[in-house]
Image: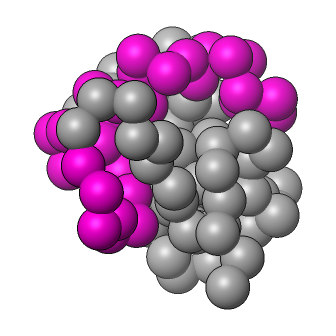
Amino acid sequence: MVEGAPTLTYRRLDYWTRTGLVHAIENDRSGSGVPRRYTEREAAVAALMARLMSTGLRLDVAAPVARQVIESNLAEIYLGQGVVLQVASLMNGAPGLGVDKS
């Protein structure tokens, strides 16, 4: 599991990457055993997706909400019928995701 994102396992992150919900940095090497690396922004998206899902949101809701919050640097987002999600800063990334700070 990844620190700061209690439900973000390797298997889940791999699935999200393969399905295009989270984007790894392009790597010259490929194949099994080659670790993926993520930008700080992508790590923050993955961490927020995991946190949202741990509260009960489905993946099809959590993924676009997380991406919009992180990419637009929103402090809160309206989810519908009086539901507003307030988000603490996650741009420090999630330790353990192979974050590339360059």
**Would you identify the image quadrant in which residue 13 lies?**
top left
What residue lies at 81% left-to-right and 33% top-to-bottom? 4
Residue 14 in view:
yes
* Left or right side of 32 for 97: right
The one nearer the camera, 11 or 74, is 11
Q: Where is residue 86 in the image (x, y as percent from the top left)?
A: 73, 52
Query: Is residue 100 inside the magenta stretch?
Result: no
What residue lies at 72% left-to-right and 76% top-to-bottom? 101
Q: In the displayed structure, would residue 86 be above or below residue 60?
A: below
Number of on-image labels: 0
Instruction: State how the image is colored.
Output: one colour
Find the magenta span and give its range. Answer: 1-30
What residue lies at 38% left-to-right and 58% top-to-bottom? 24
Picture quarter with the C terminus: bottom right
Q: In the displayed structure, would residue 30 be above or below residue 5?
A: below
What residue lies at 41% left-to-right and 21% top-to-bottom? 12
Tell me the chief SS of the magenta region: loop
* Left or right side of 77 for 17: left
